[in-house]
Image (cartoon, coloured by chain):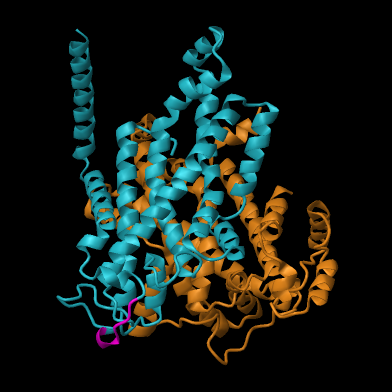
């Protein structure tokens, strides 16, 4: 897979010596040399790549250069937290974005519409770390409404790990107090992450609905006497969602990237914070593993998005060869 | 005779410009965008002359005036070292704009050339090679890729620009690829082919000039996004290094003193929003003006 090649070369082809970094500047040369041999760093790049891919496919990303812990088990520990945050935020993004866009289009050029449009402009241009800080302040410190740190309140017991997503584990085991606590902790970082994508979705949904609104087929349906509500939901909203959904994949990518900053701010014990710390420490094995995992997540999301688009857009479905 | 012709040409150009300007200025949001961009440009270029305390942009400490709230002497207040935040914000615009301009000028030429080549040679091995490489770069969330590249390099503005450039070119390749692969079927391109024009001539004289409007529109929008990404990198300490006043760096510094000394972080954050908003509004205006749909 090409993804692995580029990640590998970022990690290896850069002017730094991982073995030296791992042992520190004062380590004797023979020890560094030995570690280089152990990490196959003394061999040509293609051979190094071969070793790396072989290990990665076995779920072995080597050990952290910094903590000496196994990277794969670290990732197993931190990945669910990030997934929970990203999924929660992705759902907010898609749902609220489409809702706002639809409302805005329905009442276009009224005050609701102007409000939504202004809101979405601000949302698009504000960096997510600024939202994170503002939410932290406003809801966390000033209003003191929501918790701002971690996934659960201190002393809160984690539910038995099934999926690793606290809210879902809580639901499955029937522990609703944990679900509520987990949700409370999710809201602020989730919102901060979702804002940019949400605003973009709202803008695109709005413009696409307004464009479709003037199409002849809508006038024809109205002439047939189909109720306005049915027209809006079934015939106007559904085709208008095609551009919105197609851009969801990109927004999700931005979301995963911004998670690196937001998790840091909210002290969210997730993969991104782990990755961010690894990056700041130049812990290359951990960095490559984190990027690899997030790249795979992103690709998976894109495949799902493509399937949804195909479902919404009969032209793509038919071109795919399933129709006659 | 020649002079007449030249004047005629000029007046026609002027007329065209006036018409476009009229169309552009009908949309008040575009005008706001343009004025914001011009204002920021002005503040950034003349920062040493118009900022009240230009020496505060660098290594400067005055604990007697540390952490002052906004006042007439310091409109945006001062930070924990007693530096005037308004002055530092003006200088911060410089780093943001440098970031945007350098990244785009590094990214657009290769991206555009690769895209037009791949589009023109659609369905050949050249197309496959270029576009698959592009796909690989697009398969990693952009900010993560930039963070990763930055992290293995020494953290400074130059390396941050390198990192962002490395992840940004595929977008131009993809945009121009789409344009160029449909343009190659146009009659004027086929006519050029029939009359025996060389491949280079077709690429640069027939196809490329017709891709310019979308490219410029995208560049205007991207200025905003590049500045946003740049400030994110600075925020985590991988971009502009203190004591230089990067906007993201200033927000990160201020976040530590947030509830009490809110002005340290909030004003630079607003500054980022205003720059990005300006370029966005301008880009949207250009898109409407040039009737571009692809971007």
Q: Residue at x 78, y 69 (%)?
A: A62
Residue A314 percent location from the top left of the image: 56, 36
- Image coords of residue B267 (percent x, y): 29, 70
Chain letter, colour orange: A
Picture quarter containing residue A159? bottom right
Q: Residue furthest left?
A: B72
In the displayed structure image, the side of residue A65 where residue B256 appears, left or right: left
Q: Is residue B241 magenta?
A: no
B10 vs B191, left or right, is left
Residue B263: give x, y in percent of width and height: 28, 76
Q: Residue at x 76, y 75 (%)?
A: A70
Q: Which residues are magenta?
A: B60-65
In the image, residue A301 sits, relative to residue A207, either above or below, namely below
How many callouts does the rendering have? 0
Question: Can residue A322 be seen in the rendering of this structure?
Answer: no
Q: Quadrant of residue B31?
A: top left
- The picture places residue A76, in percent across and down from the top left corner, at 71, 72
Note the chain letter of the cyan one. Answer: B
Residue A246 in sight from this viewpoint: yes
Q: Quadrant of residue A68?
A: bottom right
- Nearest the viewer among A111 and B217 is B217
- Residue at 64% x, 31% y is B127
Q: Residue furthest bottom?
A: A155
Q: Please name whichever residue, B142 or B113, is drawn nearer the observer in this view of the structure.
A: B113
Q: Can you say whether B19 is above or below A62 in the image?
A: above
Q: Is residue A10 above or below residue B5?
A: below
Quarter holding the C terminus of chain A?
A: top right
């Amino acid at each position: 897979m090409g993804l692995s090649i580029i990640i590998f070369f970022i990690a290896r082809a850069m002017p730094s010596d991982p073995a030296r970094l791992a042992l520190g500047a004062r380590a004797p040369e023979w020890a560094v040399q030995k570690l280089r041999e152990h990490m196959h760093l003394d061999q040509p790049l293609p051979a190094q790549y071969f070793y790396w891919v072989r290990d990665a496919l076995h779920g072995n990303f080597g050990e952290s250069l910094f903590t000496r812990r196994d990277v794969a088990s670290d990732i197993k520990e931190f990945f669910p937290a990030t997934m929970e945050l990203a999924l929660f935020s992705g759902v907010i993004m898609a749902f609220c974005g489409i809702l706002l866009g639809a409302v805005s289009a329905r009442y276009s050029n009224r005050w609701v519409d102007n409000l939504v449009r202004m809101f979405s402009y601000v949302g698009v241009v504000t960096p997510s770390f600024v939202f994170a800080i503002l939410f932290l302040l406003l809801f966390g410190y000033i209003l003191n409404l929501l918790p701002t740190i971690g996934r659960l309140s201190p002393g809160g017991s984690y539910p038995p790990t099934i999926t690793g997503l606290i809210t879902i584990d809580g639901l499955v085991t029937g522990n609703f107090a944990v679900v509520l606590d987990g949700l409370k902790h999710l809201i602020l970082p989730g919102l901060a992450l979702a804002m940019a994508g949400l605003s973009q979705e709202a803008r695109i949904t709005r413009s696409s609905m307004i464009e479709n609104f003037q199409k002849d087929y809508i006038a024809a349906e109205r002439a047939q006497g189909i109720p306005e509500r049915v027209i809006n939901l079934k015939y106007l909203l559904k085709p208008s969602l095609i551009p919105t959904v197609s851009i969801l994949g990109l927004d999700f990518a931005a979301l995963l990237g911004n998670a690196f900053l937001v998790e840091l701010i909210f002290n969210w014990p997730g993969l991104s914070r782990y990755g961010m710390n690894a990056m700041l420490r130049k812990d290359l094995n951990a960095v490559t593993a984190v990027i690899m995992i997030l790249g795979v997540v992103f690709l998976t999301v894109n495949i799902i998005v493509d399937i949804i688009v195909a479902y919404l857009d009969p032209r793509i479905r038919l071109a795919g060869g399933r129709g006659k | 005779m020649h002079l007449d012709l030249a004047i005629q040409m000029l007046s026609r150009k002027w007329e065209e410009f006036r018409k476009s300007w009229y169309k552009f200025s009908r949309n008040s949001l575009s005008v706001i965008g343009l004025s914001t961009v011009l204002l920021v440009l002005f503040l950034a270029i003349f920062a040493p002359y118009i900022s009240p305390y230009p020496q505060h942009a660098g290594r400067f400490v005055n604990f007697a005036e540390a952490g002052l709230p906004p006042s007439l002497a310091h409109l945006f207040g001062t930070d924990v070292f007693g530096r005037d935040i308004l002055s530092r914000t003006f200088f911060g615009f410089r780093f943001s704009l440098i970031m945007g301009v350098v990244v785009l000028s590094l990214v657009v030429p290769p991206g555009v050339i690769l895209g037009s080549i791949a589009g023109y040679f659609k369905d050949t091995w050249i197309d496959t090679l270029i576009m698959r490489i592009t796909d690989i770069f697009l398969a990693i969330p952009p900010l993560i890729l930039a963070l990763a590249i930055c992290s293995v390099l020494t953290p400074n503005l130059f390396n941050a620009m390198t990192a962002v450039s490395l992840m940004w070119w595929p977008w131009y390749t993809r945009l121009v690829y789409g344009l160029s692969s449909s343009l190659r079927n146009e009659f004027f391109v086929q006519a050029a082919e029939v009359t025996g024009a060389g491949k280079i001539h077709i690429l640069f004289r027939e196809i490329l000039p017709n891709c310019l409007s979308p490219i410029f529109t995208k560049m205007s929008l991207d200025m905003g996004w590049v500045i946003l990404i740049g400030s994110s990198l600075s925020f985590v300490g991988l971009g502009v290094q203190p004591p230089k006043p990067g906007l993201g760096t200033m927000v990160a510094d201020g976040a530590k003193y947030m509830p009490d000394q809110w002005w340290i972080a909030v004003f630079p954050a607003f500054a980022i929003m205003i720059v990005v908003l300006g370029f966005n509004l301008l880009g949207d205006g250009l898109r409407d003006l040039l009737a571009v749909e692809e971007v």
